[in-house]
Image (spheres, grey):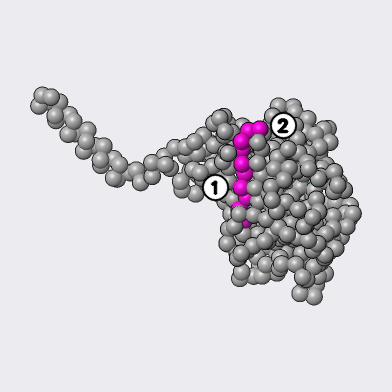
């Protein structure tokens, strides 16, 4: 190399190293994370935006600021081909229709049912809005799934933060509830959801997410052949309107037993209406623990669920009946997908023996769930 060439090389080296040292503090694995935004229209005067988070492997999750709704989740199968493993719609109008069965959304203030929408707290009786056969389901008529959240992007391009303040009296709940939800896509193909909330009056809180999963990415019309494991020896028995009776029967030797992996369809017919119950999770402590798995042998996709919550609503899409047209105009038939909603137990505020769901001023509600995807 001549003198000129050496000089050029030296200048380039200096420029390169100063550039990396002064402006680029990103880890190489972080460099390929990206977030893009797409307008999905407006509701009244608010813009609805879809945020798409992509990790270095190309795994992708799209989330709306409307309801914090996961609209798409693209994960690889055993051949490395990406497929969208959640049910949903192509446009906002799909999500706004009355028949939308909570596809992909955040759920609250109280995920699952509160009997007759009533509870007594600190000597005062409260009445919530009713939306499910005289009971309150998933926070009432206008729950957190039907509001616009404030979105921001914490550093790193792998997370989306959503915040919302539910006003004192919203759907009948006491207290101003300040809620924060952070969705994070890991480089290990995990989707993590971190929930936190504070209040200025004692109030019940039970937040969750309502993704409907089909790990074959729609190649199988139902999830009846998916194999599921639930780390739970008991479940909360319910009446005909799915309100807990207070009893916690053992699953052993019954169709509710998923302590070892079993096909969803193996004994579903023996459960009236299909699976739509809260399993009482076996937990070692309060940290994030693996409590469930779902595996689709046709694609090789495995989903492992980790949570800090004491319960899991395992719902097998029993109320889907083929009338609802989803993405690409596909009709979603019964059992087209399953939900694994990590949560406190249904009707907690009226069941003193269930884990506490009352958040008090000065305390912070925290809940963490991770859906980890891989193949086998
Ligand atoms: C409930 C089902 C309900 C569904 C809403 C689930 O969490 O347990 O009973 O139909 O949400 O689509």
Q: Is residue 152 left or right of residue 179?
A: left
Q: Outermost residue toward the left?
A: 3
Task: Report if the beta carbon of the residue with label 2 is closer than 8 angstroms to ligand 1.
Answer: no
Q: Which residues are magenta?
A: 298-307
Residue assigned mark 2: 220
In which quadrant of the rendered view does residue 320 lie?
Answer: top right
Q: Tell me the SS state at disc 2.
A: loop
Q: Tell me the SS state at disc 1.
A: strand
Q: Outermost residue toward the bottom?
A: 123
Expressed as whole percent of the image width and height from the top left, the position of residue 269 reads 85, 43
Tally the numbered discs.
2
Foreground of the two, 55 or 159: 55
Expressed as whole percent of the image width and height from the top left, the position of residue 134 reads 89, 55
Q: Is residue 253 visible?
A: yes
In which quadrant of the rendered view does residue 179 lie?
Answer: bottom right
Q: Residue at x 65, y 59 (%)?
A: 309
Establish if 46 lies above or below 250: above
Position of the C terminus by quadrant: top right
Q: Disc 2, disc 1: CB below 8 Å?
A: no
Q: Is residue 154 left or right of residue 94?
A: left
In which quadrant of the rendered view does residue 21 lie?
Answer: top left
Residue assigned mark 1: 184
Report how far apart the C-alphas of labels 2 and 1 lie in the structure.
28 Å
Expressed as whole percent of the image width and height from the top left, the position of residue 36 reads 53, 36
- Mark 2 or 1, closer to the camera: 2
């Amino acid at each position: 190399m001549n003198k000129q060439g050496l000089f050029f090389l030296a200048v380039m080296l200096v420029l390169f190293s100063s550039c990396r040292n002064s402006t680029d503090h990103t880890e190489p694995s972080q460099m390929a994370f990206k977030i893009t935004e797409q307008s999905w229209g407006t509701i009244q005067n608010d813009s609805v935006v879809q945020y798409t988070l992509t990790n270095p492997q190309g795994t992708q999750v799209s989330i709306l600021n409307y309801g914090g709704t996961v609209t798409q989740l693209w994960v690889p199968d055993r051949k490395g081909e990406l497929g969208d493993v959640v049910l949903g719609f192509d446009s906002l109008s799909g999500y706004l229709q009355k028949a939308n069965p909570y596809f992909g959304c955040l759920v609250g203030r109280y995920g699952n049912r509160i009997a007759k929408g009533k509870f007594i707290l600190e000597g005062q009786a409260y009445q919530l809005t009713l939306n499910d056969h005289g009971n309150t389901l998933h926070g009432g008529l206008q729950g957190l799934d039907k509001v616009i959240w404030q979105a921001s992007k914490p550093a790193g391009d792998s997370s989306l933060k959503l915040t919302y303040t539910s006003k004192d009296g919203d759907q009948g709940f006491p207290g101003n509830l300040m809620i924060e939800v952070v969705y994070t896509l890991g480089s290990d193909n995990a989707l993590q959801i971190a929930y936190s909330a504070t209040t200025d009056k004692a109030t019940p809180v039970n937040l969750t997410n309502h993704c409907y999963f089909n790990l074959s990415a729609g190649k199988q019309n139902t999830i009846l052949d998916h194999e599921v494991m639930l780390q739970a020896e008991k479940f909360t028995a319910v009446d005909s309107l799915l309100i807990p009776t207070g009893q916690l029967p053992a699953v052993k030797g019954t169709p509710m037993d998923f302590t070892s992996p079993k096909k969803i369809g193996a004994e579903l017919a023996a459960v009236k209406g299909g699976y739509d119950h809260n399993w009482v999770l076996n937990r070692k402590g309060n940290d994030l623990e693996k409590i469930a798995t779902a595996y689709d042998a046709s694609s090789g996709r495995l989903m492992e669920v980790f949570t800090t919550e004491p319960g899991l609503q395992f719902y097998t899409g029993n109320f889907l009946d083929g009338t609802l047209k989803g993405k690409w105009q596909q009709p979603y038939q019964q059992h087209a997908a399953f939900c694994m909603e990590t949560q406190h137990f249904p009707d907690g505020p009226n069941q003193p023996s269930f884990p506490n769901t009352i958040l008090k001023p000065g305390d912070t509600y925290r809940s963490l769930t991770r859906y980890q995807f891989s193949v086998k």
